[in-house]
Amino acid sequence: MRQFSAVIWKVKPGFDEELADLFENSKRPDSAVILDEAGSEVGKLLSTAVFLKDDTVVRVIQYEGELISVMRHMAGQQVVRELEDGLQKYLVEPRETDSPQAFRDFFLRTSMRRLLQRWADE
């Protein structure tokens, strides 16, 4: 089943162009396919979008599978760690994302509540 999730970052104002450059130049994860510990496919990353308004950056991801599997997959991606490192100097509150557990904690703490999700073909 396709799903959406979103995370939020509070950023220092006045860095719109720097943040836009950071996200525009970020790379894709190594694979869109999400595997479990045994190597079986358990999900897929379908799309992502990032929005900026004032002091708030929101990243929306569309995926198939369980959110916990998505978090584990993303925490293991070098490109995600590089983006997180690049974001640090723009954040209002620095955070730890240097381990899978720290990344998971950040993701859970900053996840937005999904109020609605609809599909035109359903």
Image (spheres, grey):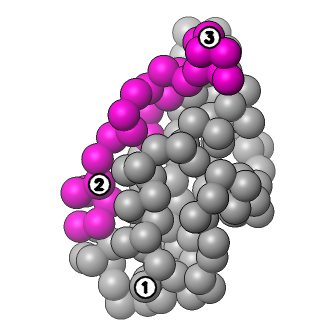
Residue 86 appearing in the image: yes
Q: Which mark is residue 80?
A: none
Q: Which residue is mark 1?
A: 89
Question: Dot 2 surroundings within 10 Å: few (below 14), some, or many (20 or more)?
Answer: some
Local secondary structure at mark 2: loop
Q: CA distance from mark 1 to mark 3?
A: 37 Å
For the point 33% across and 84% down, which residue is it? 15
Q: Quadrant of the N terminus?
A: top right
Residue 7 place in picture, x, y as percent = 62, 56
Q: Which residue bears the numbered disc 3?
A: 40
Q: Give coordinates of residue 110: x percent, y percent.
A: 70, 62
Q: Earlier in the sequence, mark 2 or mark 1?
A: 2
Front residue of this view, candidates 23 and 54:
23
Q: Three-letter amino acid code at disc 1?
A: Lys
Tell me if residue 55 can be seen. Answer: no
Q: Nearer the viewer, mark 1 or mark 3?
A: 3
Residue in view at x 41 percent, y 49 percent: 78
